[in-house]
Image: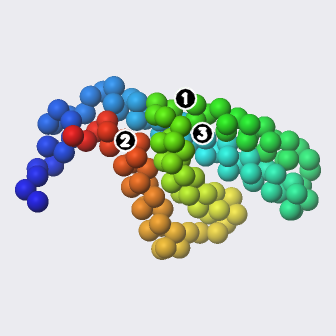
């Protein structure tokens, strides 16, 4: 209870620049992976379920293949990356549904999204930022 905020972070008062760059790169990679996976799945979905042209299916397949490569650039090992990505996928899927399909997240979606993002942070970045 008496822990001061500054003592939570490495070096007592600041985070090394390398840690921030590594984290930002990782976040960008998660977002790219999310667009590839969700966009790819959506392309196949609209092709097969909504009668769009095969172009959407082919684009979807290409994005899904690309998705398989993107996580390999993450700085952590496979299990950690895919466990954390699960949380990113949840939040990005909710955002996709809201912005693309027009279905706004409700308060339970928002609460669940916040919980999984805490899990993502804990799994991927706590070792770099916290004591």
Q: Earlier in the sequence, mark 2 or mark 1?
A: 1
x, y percent for residue 56: 84, 47
Is 62 positioned to the left or the right of 72 in the image? right
Q: Which quadrant: the N terminus? A: bottom left
Marks 1 and 3 sit apart, C-alpha to C-alpha, by 11 Å
Q: Tell me, yes or no, whether the two marked residues, 1 and 3, touch with CB atoms within 8 Å.
A: no
How many C-alpha atoms fall within 10 Å of the one at disc 1: few (<14), some, or many (≥20)?
few
User: Which image quadrant for residue 55?
Assistant: top right
Please identify the residue farthest to the front as the structure is shown.
79
Numbered badge on residue 73: 1
What kind of element bears circle 1?
Answer: helix
Front position in the image: 64 or 97: 64
Q: Residue at 54% of width from left, 52% of height from top? A: 86
How many C-alpha atoms fall within 10 Å of the one at disc 3: few (<14), some, or many (≥20)?
some
Q: Residue at 67% of width from left, 42% of height from top? A: 36
Q: Tell me, yes or no, whether the two marked residues, 2 and 1, touch with CB atoms within 8 Å.
A: no
Marks 2 and 1 sit apart, C-alpha to C-alpha, by 15 Å
Q: Is residue 83 visible?
A: yes
Q: Earlier in the sequence, mark 1 or mark 3?
A: 3
Q: Which quadrant: the C terminus? A: top left
Numbered badge on residue 31: none
How many C-alpha atoms fall within 10 Å of the one at disc 2: few (<14), some, or many (≥20)?
some
Numbered badge on residue 125: 2
Front position in the image: 38 or 69: 69
**Mark 1, mark 3: which one is toward the viewer?**
1
User: Which image quadrant for residue 82?
Assistant: top right
x, y percent for residue 4: 11, 50
What kind of element bears circle 3?
Answer: helix
Question: Which residue matches tag 3?
Answer: 32
């Amino acid at each position: 209870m008496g822990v001061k905020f500054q003592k939570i972070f490495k070096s007592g008062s600041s985070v090394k620049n390398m840690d921030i760059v590594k984290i930002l790169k990782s976040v960008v990679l998660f977002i790219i992976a999310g667009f590839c996976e969700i966009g790819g799945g959506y392309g196949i979905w609209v092709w097969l379920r909504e009668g769009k042209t095969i172009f959407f299916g082919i684009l979807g397949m290409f994005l899904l293949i690309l998705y398989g490569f993107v996580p390999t650039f993450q700085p952590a090992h496979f299990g950690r990356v895919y466990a954390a990505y699960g949380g990113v996928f949840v939040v990005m899927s909710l955002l996709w549904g809201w912005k693309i399909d027009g279905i706004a997240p409700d308060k339970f979606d928002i609460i669940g999204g916040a919980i999984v993002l805490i899990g993502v942070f804990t799994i991927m970045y706590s070792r770099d930022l916290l004591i």
